[in-house]
Image: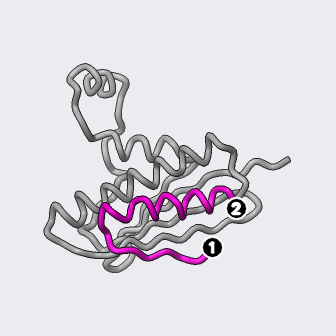
Amino acid sequence: MEALILPGKLENLGEIRQYIKSAATEAGLEKKASYKLCLAVDEIATNIITHGYNKNGLEGNIFLKAERNEQNLTVCIEDTAIPYDPTIQEPFTEEDLQSNLEEGTIGGLGVYLAMEGVDEFKYERLGDRNRNILIMNRTTT
């Protein structure tokens, strides 16, 4: 698929979702896997926009690239916001999750949901860019 480059604005989340849905359909992902991938990308993109750009008074683009091969669909999400490696975040425990639900806390689960929803999640810092790599295995019949 061709890459998608959009300004890092909340109003562009719909276009990002559509891009990922199309990539998942082209890759033949099952409905549940497609949903999980869309949710994961949505969470990462939302965090980039709200925490990486807006909260820091920055503006920048979100760069998306979906590639598939026989085994999987790989989605790369890049941004030029402040460095942030989601893989070093403390993992959520059952107690954390229960506490969030009981206290009605909003937020904080996005990275957890993204990482748990895909088959593999990687992070790289390349020059001035954060690169989040989300991999979904394709089913073979």
Q: Is residue 126 above or below residue 20?
A: below
Q: Nearer the viewer, residue 42 or 52?
A: 42
Quadrant including the N terminus: bottom right
Nearer to me, 105 or 93: 105
Left or right: 27 in relation to 41: right
Please report the residue visible at 53 percent of the width from the left and 71 percent of the height from the top.
65
Q: Secondary structure at mark 2?
A: helix
Label 1: state its secondary structure. Answer: loop
- Residue 20's x, y, as percent? 55, 60
Residue that badge 1 annotates: 1
Q: Main secondary structure of the magenta part?
A: helix
Residue 26 disc label: 2
Q: The residue under label 1 is which amino acid type?
A: Met
Q: Amino acid at mark 2?
A: Glu
Residue 127 image-quadrant placement: bottom left
> Percent from the top left, x then y, of residue 136?
61, 52
Mark nearer the N terminus (1 vs 2) = 1
